[in-house]
Image: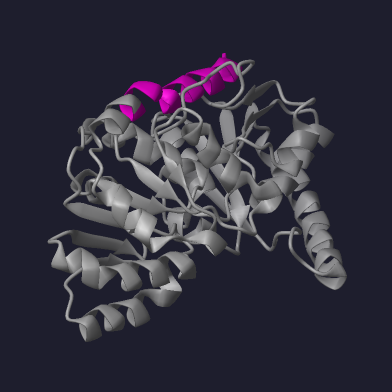
């Protein structure tokens, strides 16, 4: 085991955290530290993860989409967390800091810049987030699957999404995927389509988000329809493998995991995402004719039912050819360069 320490930072949502999870699993026997937020999904993912020998969950929250008083409060918390991160760096003397963005990453990423610690950034979205845009000139490496200048083009996806991939043709099962936070619009769409899908013999798998699990389960029971309903699951690759079409938000990790699995999707971008980045993520696939996009305010159920009747084989096959494997290993190898 190398004595050098790698700090991994960022999170808030499952999309950010999935990147850290994929990369850290390719760094066994290394001294890894996680720095995230007490808010969001960070604790749920990593509080008891033994791959990290130290874990810090700081009192931070996002700045975007808040009023002036909320922004001031968030900036105050970020300033306090920044000072804490400076202390962590002084104590641990890391060789490199790997940031995946999100508000959870800001204190440690800026502390890396302040204390001249090498910073490697992974930008998961087609539209670069403000934090990563500000730090890009400082970063030793800036990784993005959407940029030709990136040292690594492969997205860090766990190998199980590739090993469980298959070519789809006829739609016999649909996966409604709202992400770790859930999506009320997708939940409502799934319940509205459920009677027709049931009549056509199409199975339903539905990720509701934690706050809506009980209510959605109750609605399916009232409709007399059997569906696999869950909020969070570490078996998402198996659910994807079972499905022939997904209706999903367009967070970057979900988008690349679906693509690696060969699962075509109708993307409904989260309308309030910063810089409309979910739309840009999905448009990257739309431009290559391997996906569909519907704005949330323009969901067309008739069009969705028509899409379900299409042959998925060409899109499914092309999706698998678009996604490179071993992105997680390539990033892990790059990080290990700083330990030599």
Q: Is residue 24 above or below residue 37?
A: above
For the magenta stretch, what is the residue range?
Answer: 319-340
Front in this rendered view, residue 190 or 334: 190
Front in this rendered view, residue 21 or 218: 218
Q: Is residue 130 above or below residue 47?
A: above
Residue 47 appears left or right of 304: right
Give the percent coordinates (x, y) of residue 16.
54, 46
Visual colour scheme: one colour
In the image as oriented, which residue stretches furthest toward the left? 201
In the image as oriented, which residue stretches furthest toward the bottom? 222
Q: Is residue 328 above or below residue 198?
A: above
Give the percent coordinates (x, y) of residue 286.
48, 35
Residue 270 appears left or right of 314: right
Q: Quadrant of the C terminus?
A: top right
**Residue visible at 38% across and 39% down in the picture:** 257
Q: Is residue 207 above or below residue 291?
A: below
Give the percent coordinates (x, y) of residue 221.
21, 82
Q: Is residue 21 visible?
A: no
Whether residue 277 is in magenta: the answer is: no
> What type of secondary structure mainly makes up the magenta span?
helix
């Amino acid at each position: 085991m190398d004595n050098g320490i790698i700090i991994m930072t960022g999170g808030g949502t499952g999309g950010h955290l999935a990147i850290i999870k994929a990369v850290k699993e390719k760094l066994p026997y290394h001294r890894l530290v996680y720095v995230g937020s007490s808010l969001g999904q960070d604790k749920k993912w990593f509080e008891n993860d033994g791959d990290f020998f130290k874990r810090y969950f700081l009192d931070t929250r996002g700045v975007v989409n808040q009023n002036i008083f909320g922004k001031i409060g968030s900036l105050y918390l970020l300033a306090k967390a920044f000072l804490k991160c400076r202390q962590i760096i002084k104590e641990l003397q890391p060789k490199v800091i790997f940031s995946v963005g999100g508000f959870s990453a800001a204190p440690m990423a800026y502390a890396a810049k302040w204390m001249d610690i090498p910073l490697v950034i992974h930008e998961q979205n087609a539209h670069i987030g403000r934090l990563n845009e500000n730090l890009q000139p400082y970063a030793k490496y800036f990784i993005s699957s959407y940029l030709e200048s990136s040292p690594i083009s492969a997205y860090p996806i766990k190998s199980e999404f590739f090993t469980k991939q298959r070519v789809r043709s006829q739609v016999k099962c649909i996966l409604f995927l709202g992400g770790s936070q859930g999506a009320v619009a997708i939940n409502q769409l799934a319940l509205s389509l459920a009677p027709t899908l049931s009549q056509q013999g199409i199975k339903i798998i539905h990720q509701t988000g934690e706050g809506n699990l009980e209510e959605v389960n109750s609605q399916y029971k009232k409709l007399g329809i059997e569906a696999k309903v869950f909020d969070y699951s570490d078996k998402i690759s198996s659910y994807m493998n079972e499905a022939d079409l997904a209706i999903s938000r367009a967070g970057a990790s979900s988008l690349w995991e679906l693509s690696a699995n060969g699962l075509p999707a109708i993307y409904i971008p989260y309308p309030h995402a910063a810089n409309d980045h979910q739309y840009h993520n999905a448009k990257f696939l739309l431009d290559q004719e391997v996906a569909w996009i519907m704005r949330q305010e323009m969901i067309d159920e008739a069009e969705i039912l028509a899409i379900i009747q299409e042959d998925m084989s060409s899109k499914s096959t092309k999706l698998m050819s678009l996604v490179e494997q071993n992105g997680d290993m390539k990033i892990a190898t790059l990080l290990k360069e700083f330990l030599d």
